[in-house]
Image (cartoon, coloured by chain):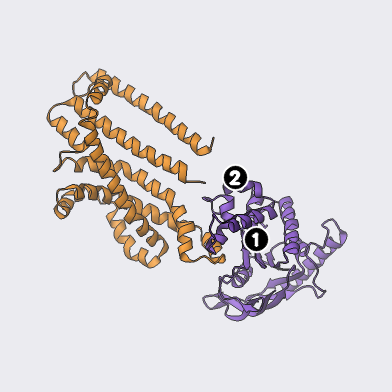
Chain colours: A purple, B orange
Amino acid sequence: MLVFQTCAAGYDGVPVFRSVSFSVGEGHLYAIIGRSGCGKTTLLSCAAGLHALYAGTVSRAGEVVHEPHPRIGLVPQDPGLFPWYTVARNVGLGLEIAGLSRRSAGYRQRVEQALQSVGLLHCAARLPSKLSGGERQRVSLARTLARNPDVLLLDEPFSALDALTREALQDDLVQLLSVRRIAAVLVTHSIEEAVFLGSRIAIMTGRPATLHELDSEPAGKPGRWSRTDRAYAEQCRRVRELFAEADHD
Amino acid sequence: MTDGRTSLLRRFRDLAGGAVILVAAWWLLALILANRVLPVPPVVFGRLFDLLPEPLLSHAGASLGRVLRAVGLATGFAVPFGILLGRNRLADSLFSPAAYLMYPVPKIALLPVVFLILGVGEAARVGIVALVLFFQMLFVVRDAVRAVPASYVRILSGMGGKPIHTVRFVVIPAVFPAILTGLRIGTGTALAVLFFAETFFTRYGLGFFIIDSWSKVAYTDMMAGIVSLSVLGILLFTVLDLLESVFVRR
């Protein structure tokens, strides 16, 4: 479980967001919608232990996060694959940093499992330049999964992809969260994505930004909607209206 | 067949084509001038084989040894120093202006100073070539380090990477092509400087052989020396291309 308690952070003493409190449990995804520059990425950086908070705490399994934690994985918007390494080496980088030898059976097994879970085991020996945009983002996800995280921080990971690839990756993510019992926080511009994936949805607005949860209903499972359902379209419309109201305030 | 091998074969084909055109142009010019200063290619190549293995191989070996030692010396200093300038703003602001001022200074003009400081032995000849290569590589490496996307460093940090991991997994792989580029740019100039440096206080090296043949009015030998020096340059370029095709993956 990941818990934010009255968090505030910013740059050069100027807060970007304040009073952010929420929690997300295993198998659930907390979706945050916000405009560009509202502090979404900074919020995830704090949870990843890459940016210091001005106030409050982020804790994982009861332990305050001060620095990058091996069980907290960050998936950035830009896959950021290193072009000089093969797909397999990219996926195993976190393991190498953790001190695992590339020759060890454990290393090979975890890399293979991670690639298998995103359906790209056959691409292990390829260079990132030979992959499509969707495949690169899958490799980025596999790189995070190889470290066996129980918290995933997703920073608009699908925003640069075409609609069909995005939907396929959203479906994959739903599976992964459910099977691996991962707690996830997703920041996105897309209301449709937030509704489809989010157990809960919040919007981030204002300067400094604050978080407004849009739903008072019990948290649902990610991917509980069918994209063709009228109820899903209705939920998107409702969230869009609430977003407009909160953004206007 | 990999893209790297295909491009390497293409490069060899291009080189062979270029060599044919050059020799043809040389032959034509020699026929037009009809002057013993410029013998026709078959005469020069015939003499070249007469001079092999000795004394030409000893001269070529001496020149190659100096170039390789200079490359090692320049790389050993320019790469860590370039990484430091690219990664550390304070070091960059302290040293880059001075290095920038030194960059356009023709290093060959420093040859007398180098001879006076290092003596008239091998150290001076290697040192002056290393000096040329050092400045060529320093800025290429520094700029390559600066061009490393900040997102790469953030991704590594997110995985618990420390600065040493950034250097190992990001900076060195990102800088390697730049090192080869710096060497490629510097090799031509380095050979020119070596040629000049070999005309003083030595009896070995292709520079000495060419100037010595010239002074003895042995123009065919002189041309054979020039061809050998050109072959040495092409060999160095080809080795750099090979290294790039094997180790640089994009």
Residue at 39% x, 42% y is: B240
Disc 1: CA contacts within 10 A as few (<14), some (14-19) or many (>=20): many
User: With respect to residue B194, does B141 lie above or below?
Assistant: below
Q: In the image, residue B118 lies at what x, y percent?
A: 17, 53
Disc 2: CA contacts within 10 A as few (<14), some (14-19) or many (>=20): some
Q: In the image, residue A17 lies at what x, y percent?
A: 62, 76
Label 1, label 2: how far apart the Cα atoms are: 22 Å
Q: Residue furthest front?
A: A105
Report the chain holding disc 2.
A
Image quadrant in which the N terminus of chain B is located: top right
Return the mark for residue A145: 1
Q: Which residue is mark 2?
A: A130
User: With respect to residue B208, does A232 lie above or below?
Assistant: below
The amino acid sitting under disc 1 is Leu
Q: In the image, residue A148 lies at what x, y percent?
A: 64, 64
Q: Are marks 1 and 2 in contact (CB under 8 Å)?
A: no
- State which quadrant residue B208 falls in: top left
User: With respect to residue B54, does A86 lie above or below?
Assistant: below
The amino acid sitting under disc 2 is Lys
Residue at 16% x, 30% y is: B213
User: With respect to residue B22, does B243 lie above or below?
Assistant: below
Residue at 25% x, 24% y is: B49
- State which quadrant residue A114 falls in: bottom right
Visible in this render: residue B207? Answer: yes
